[in-house]
Amino acid sequence: MADDIDLFGAAGQRGPAPRKIPPPPARKAAPSRNGKGTPDEADYNADSIEVLEGLEPVRRRPGMYIGGTDEIALHHLFAEVLDNCMDEAVAGHATWIEVQLDEGDWLTVTDNGRGMPVDPHPKFPKKSALEIIMTVLHAGGKFDSGAYQTSGGLHGVGVSVVNALSDRLEVEVARGQVLYAQAFERGAPVTKLEIKGKAPNRRGTKVRFHPDAAIFAKGAHFRPARLFRMSRSKAYLFGGVEIRWKCAPSLLEPGSPIPDEAVFRFPGGLKDYLAQDTEGKEPVVEQAFTGKVEKPGGHGSLEWAITWLSDDDGFVHSYCNTIPTPDGGTHESGLRIALLRALKDHAERINQSKRAAVLTTDDVMNGCAALIAIFMREPEFQGQNKGRLMSAEAARIVDQSVRDAFDHWLAASPSQAVKLLDWTIDRAEERLRRRAEKDIARKTPVRKLRLPGKLADCTNSSAQGSELFIVEGDSAGGSAKQARDRASQAILPLRGKILNVANATRDKLNANQQLADLVQALGCGTLSQYREDDLRYDKIIVMTDADVDGAHIASLLITFFYRQMPKLIDAGHLFLAIPPLYRLSQGTKTAYARDDAHKDELMRTLFTGKGKVDVGRFKGLGEMMAAQLKETTMDPRKRTLLRVVIREEDRAETADSVERLMGAKPEARFAFIQERAEFAAETALVDI
């Protein structure tokens, strides 16, 4: 440590050089007479009982107070100091907090609150209240609810632990227009409380500290990115505070997104926090469910911001008195129960209670992005790290407040409520399907994969290089099975036109056996349960007749994949086969035409000699000989496939087109047909 330390920063005053504190004397091993390294009864006496005084227990067993000595525990020191400042802000006494990280792991946290008390303590008249706070465990202003209505520091050990585990800690207090200061090393005062002069334009507390390298693991340092996120999250949790961030530029890596200076102020609170955390993700509902209730249960407050993500597992971040509770607790339990009960109550109001009966809290919370912050008196945490809230009252407060508000939100947005209900029921049904599949597999002696009866599977056990041809009808399926390469090509015949999933009810979709067979054959699940690694085929090829009916069936299948398995399309697995509509022959010359335009082109370019050209029109794939089907449509060396893609810039237009042409409003389709009546008439004449 340098001999000359800038103790007071902006104040421009310097304190005395730090006093070197000798390490504690090495403990001598107790004599052993039993060969196990422990003293015998004669040696185990009053001298064996060690009494740890002051902050020595913290230095001896830091894990009991901050959870360990790794880098995560190191950042807990910052959390303890920042929480004290936040308590001042929440209580209405501070409007800003400043966090400054300097070179050498020096961290400074300042607020403009009331300032720590500096007058002599009644029980220890020779010591100031500030020194008692910094050097005595379980000393603080938060045991008496009169000092703070709600607070995060409840055990009176937070800042004293920081002091104990720092090789240098310096405190400034501006109170009553007077500036006070005191310095500590490894928990012990090295200066007395000093008056540094007048401070007419300053108030609050400034704590500057340096973690003791002898305590923390080698290589553990304050990370700017972590401190930045911790500071910003506090500003989200209490909209009435401004947090100022400063960091020495030399500590930031080149190109780091972390600025050296920033100001955090979020009047929107958790609503702003949720928008930032879910940016770029696709929500299930258009409007997030947000709210705030003052004095639930007679004191404190409760705030929440919740949405659901269609393509993400979601998250729940909970807080109590601005303290993060990563292990959850009773407030999270109350939230889960409230959301489930309100959603089921709404389902009952719209006569959907039977469908919603399968819902559990997991179904509602999977994909749920939730932030919840409760402020309450004397909360009970699990351990000094406060990772889990244990107050039983919190569950009741959250359940009642959130459920009432969610009831109103669902009733005020009926279309969004139905969308959310359908989405959660989808997840519940998928969960039940998976459970049923596991139960069947568990009961099957040789765990064979269950596949649809009409599926002619390929022998290749790997998805790589495997293809599934979806064909219409058993007749086409028979031809395709004869024409295929059994090693890599599987055939699944479907009966006629499948269900239009764009305008079908959820019950019809679930009851449709053809779609169930298709999903079972693919093995990858649907919607949010889609699993790319479980897809059994590399290429999914829709192979229908080259006529209007075939095109209609293909459009229905594409709509199914677009609505139920969009990730399959995005991954490039979906293709359309191009079977011929005509066979042209002249003597020994034979060619196949995709459509009328292609036929006319071949007639002009290929069949130019004398002699009649025989033109045969295929009524369907089922009427093609297996050899013809293989040669024209299935042989990878000769066929043509169209890959189905959705360009990023066309996604909105694609969604609109699918809804207009395949959705539940027939008038949109009718208008489309009227606009293209001439084309439809020409197509009908060709079909005759």
Image (cartoon, grey):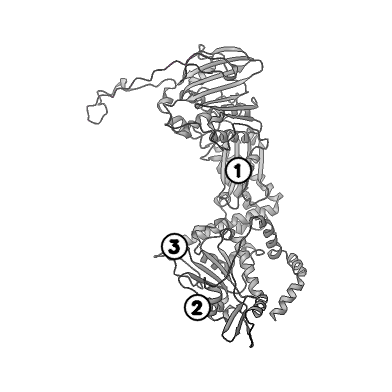
According to the picture, the residue beneath numbered tag 2 turns out to be: 482
Number of residues whose C-alpha sits closer than 10 Å to that of mark 1, classed few (under 14), some (14–19) or many (20 or more): few
Secondary structure category for the residue under label 1: helix
Which SS does the magenta portion mostly show? loop
Report the disc number at residue 343.
Answer: none
Residue 99: which quarter of the image?
top right
Asked if the stretch drawn in magenta spans residue 325, the answer is: no
Number of residues whose C-alpha sits closer than 10 Å to that of mark 3, classed few (under 14), some (14–19) or many (20 or more): some
Is residue 488 among the parts visible in the rendering?
A: yes
According to the picture, the residue beneath numbered tag 3 turns out to be: 441
**Marks 1 and 3, how far apart at CA:** 39 Å
Instruction: Judge whether 238 appears above or below 620 on screen.
Output: above
Number of residues whose C-alpha sits closer than 10 Å to that of mark 2, classed few (under 14), some (14–19) or many (20 or more): some
Instruction: Judge whether 25 appears above or below 286 on screen.
Output: above
Q: Position of residue 329 (x, y in %)?
A: 53, 40
Q: Position of residue 618 (x, y in %)?
A: 61, 81
Asked if the stretch drawn in magenta spans residue 28, the answer is: yes
According to the picture, the residue beneath numbered tag 1 turns out to be: 277
Q: Nearer the viewer, residue 391 or 643?
A: 643
In the picture, which quadrant includes the C terminus? bottom right
Disc 1 marks a residue whose amino acid type is: Asp
Mark closer to the chain start, 1 or 3: 1
Mark closer to the chain start, 2 or 3: 3
Instruction: Judge whether 39 appears above or below 660 on screen.
Output: above
Span colored in magenta: 13-35
Disc 2 marks a residue whose amino acid type is: Gln
Q: Nearer the viewer, residue 165 or 647?
A: 647
Q: Position of residue 386 (x, y in %)?
A: 51, 34
Disc 3 marks a residue whose amino acid type is: Ala
Residue 277: which quarter of the image?
top right
